[in-house]
Amino acid sequence: LLFPRRSFPYFMLASHAGREGRERRRWKHVKQACKLASIELGDLHAMMAIVAAESASPTLTATAIDKMQNFAASVLLLLSRSASKDGKLELAQQMAERACEVRGNLEDLDELAYVQMKEGKFSAAERSYRLLLLRHPSASAHFALGAALWADRRTVTGAIREFELGLQLDQDNAEMHVKLGMMMEEEGEEEGGRTACEHYRKAVELNGNHDVARFLLSKCLNLQGKLVESASNYRHLLGRQEGHCEARYNLVEVMHNALLFEEREENEKKAMACIAQQLTAIGRTTIHPLQSLRFVPHPLLNDIIDAHNKLVVSSPLPSVALKLPVINMRVGYIA
């Protein structure tokens, strides 16, 4: 053996012997691995398992083998999570892979897929999540698989389908309704936009304080021509976040298109002040001034219009688009 003082190779040899049905050899390697593990880690439970395994009872011996393999995998899983937290993703993946080889339960697979997502290895994560789903179907596993497919961008339709399957099992998950709606909107199809709007509406029904869901619902309703309802939702959001520039500006646009005059002047002034504040602070705006705002008196009006014209050829700030980022989540299996 290349590493005679380490326990892991002996666990690997034991697993290989077990697959071949050679129980005597399996036990020999596990016992050696246990001894090394107890020395390396100073673990009392490991030493007690070795003592118990010395019994002549075959049942107790088999139990001791399983106990020690579980012990080794648990240590590897903890090492993987620690490395992942420290940003040592290659080491984290190695530890998670070893845990899967030694034990391979749902929690081990979950951690491996999580690390693979962090590394950007989306195809590998997809395979891990599919294996999880085969062994234990759940809403979280569908969401996680959908996230891997979405990040990989090869099968966007498959990603949407996985989120739909997940929501069939967990209909009251507001966050996933929002994420599915954003996926559908990014696809750009008219039917997808209508369905996205219903997911945002469901999310708001489930959680009235979900500001992203309400903002996206308001935008959807505006595109569908439901201007009064859109304005009502923007007002609700601004009641919680008065400084939400995009919501304020969009409310003015909706009021202008719907010929809603009540409080429009007040909202126009607040929108202009918001734009001016952004322009002064960062030299750019996260919203595009419309014709309806160009007639509102403001000392920085010309600068604001110039900033808008520059945005046509330059990339806007991230808050404009609200694109769905890569989603990474632990499924949360407890072994």
Image (spheres, rainbow, N blue to C red):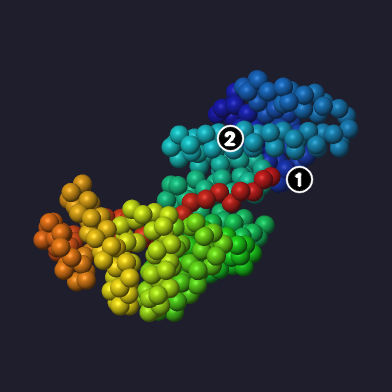
Q: Position of residue 50 (x, y in %)?
A: 77, 26
Q: Secondary structure at mark 1?
A: loop
Residue under label 1: 21
Q: Is residue 244 visible?
A: yes
* Corner quadrant of residue 259: bottom left
Residue found at x 61% / y 48%: 332
Residue found at x 64% / y 36%: 74
Mark sitting on residue 191: none
| Residue 138 vertical position relative to residue 330 in the rendered view, above or below | below
The amino acid pointed to by label 1 is Gly
Residue under label 2: 78
Observer-side mark, 1 or 2, equals 2
Residue 91 horizontal side relative to residue 311, left or right: right
Residue found at x 52% / y 60%: 208
Q: Position of residue 118 (x, y in %)?
A: 45, 47
Residue 272 horizontal side relative to residue 127, left or right: left
Residue found at x 86% / y 27%: 55
* Corner quadrant of residue 218: bottom left
Q: Position of residue 134 (x, y in %)?
A: 65, 60
Q: Quadrant of the C terminus?
A: top right
Neighbour tally class for label 2: few under 14, some 14-19, many 20 plus, Cα within 10 Å: some
Residue 143 horizontal side relative to residue 324, left or right: right
Cα separation, mark 1 vs mark 2, equals 30 Å
Label 1 vs 2, first from the N-terminus: 1
Q: Secondary structure at mark 2?
A: helix
| Residue 113 vertical position relative to residue 67 in the rendered view, above or below | below
Nearest the eye: 9 or 281: 281
Q: Is residue 91 visible?
A: no
Q: As drawn, which residue projects farthest toward the right?
A: 57
Nearest the eye: 21 or 197: 197
Q: Position of residue 7 (x, y in %)?
A: 63, 28
